[in-house]
Image (cartoon, rainbow, N blue to C red):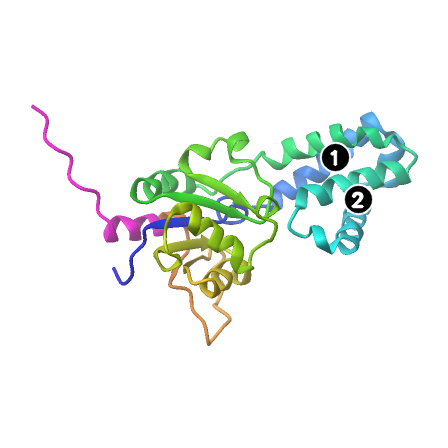
Amino acid sequence: MSFPVHAITLDLDDTLWPFAPIGARIERVLEAWMREHSPATAVRFPAAEMRALRERVVAAHPHLVHDLGALRRLTLERALAESGGDPALADAAYEAFYEARNQVECYPDVIAALERIAAHVPVAALTNGNADLARIGLDHHFRFALGAREHGAAKPEAGIFLAACTRLGCAPAHVLHVGDDIELDVLGASRAGLRSCWINRGGFDWPHADAQPDLHFDSLAALADWLDAALPQPAKAATA
């Protein structure tokens, strides 16, 4: 083992599960919800128009870039108001969105790999998104989840990585951050002083000649294999 790993911080979207199917489901669910509860909004803001409205809301509120939930809620409020609907429906619409957002399908290797990884070191979720691990049913694998909304700033800013290290009680150099995004996860973690692991399920080429991830795998299972070799479990005591 070339460096110590005392804890792991782990990205969620596109690391544990693909986000594209979730995004498509969200659009279908919201469109159907609006057709039932605010038909004028469904007509004025079908999926493509709702997507464009959300982009306008994001552009108009750069101070909320770390809070995707707030941006989504603002989008729903504006869609209802601009279509002549009832803005008071925004809370119920948001709940429909959030239920769909947390219906995830993990990559096939993830559940078993999480169990193996968490058996070696503490694991914390570190995400810019708004997934709810308790709703999803994976929270028991994690010491805690730290989101950009809670922290007040998003990856790749160093502060969110360092805050996770503090909560884990580990020096940054002893924490391995694992994620799929080159800028947000790998380079962000490295700049903050953490070790980095790139999960590259798409078989992409690494684009930077002047910076490299400490580890590079095509699945979370491969990281679990590496940890099994680097940090073997102590033998169980014999029972009488």
Distance (Cα) linking label 1 and label 2: 9 Å
Residue at x-position 44% and y-position 41% = 108
Under mark 2, the amino acid is Met
Percent x, y of residue 9: 43, 49
Position of 97 relative to 201 (above/below) = above
- The span picked out in magenta is 222-240
Give me the disc on residue 50.
2
58 sits left or right of 142 in the view: right
Q: Residue furthest right?
A: 84
Left or right of 15 on screen, residue 171: left
Q: Secondary structure at mark 1?
A: helix
Q: Specify the farthest residue to the bottom.
A: 210
Question: Mark 1: which amino acid?
Answer: Leu
Q: Which mark is residue 120?
A: none
Q: On the rendered structure, is 154 left or right of 49?
A: left
Q: Which quadrant holds residue 183?
A: bottom right
Please report the residue visible at 35 percent of the width from the left and 38 percent of the height from the top: 115
**Residue 120 spot, x, y in % from top left:** 29, 44
Reply above or below: 143 against 52.
above
Relative to 68, 120 lies left or right? left
Residue 133 appearing in the image: yes
Q: Quadrant of residue 41?
A: top right
Q: The N terminus appears in which quarter of the rendering?
A: bottom left
- Look at the picture and state if 121 lies above or below 237: below
Q: Which residue is mark 1?
A: 30
Asked if residue 230 lies in the magenta stretch, the reply is yes
Nearer the N terminus, badge 1 or badge 2? 1
Question: In the image, residue 5 lies at what x, y percent?
Answer: 32, 54
Q: Residue furthest left?
A: 240
Quarter of the image where the C terminus is located: top left
The local secondary structure at tag 2 comes to helix
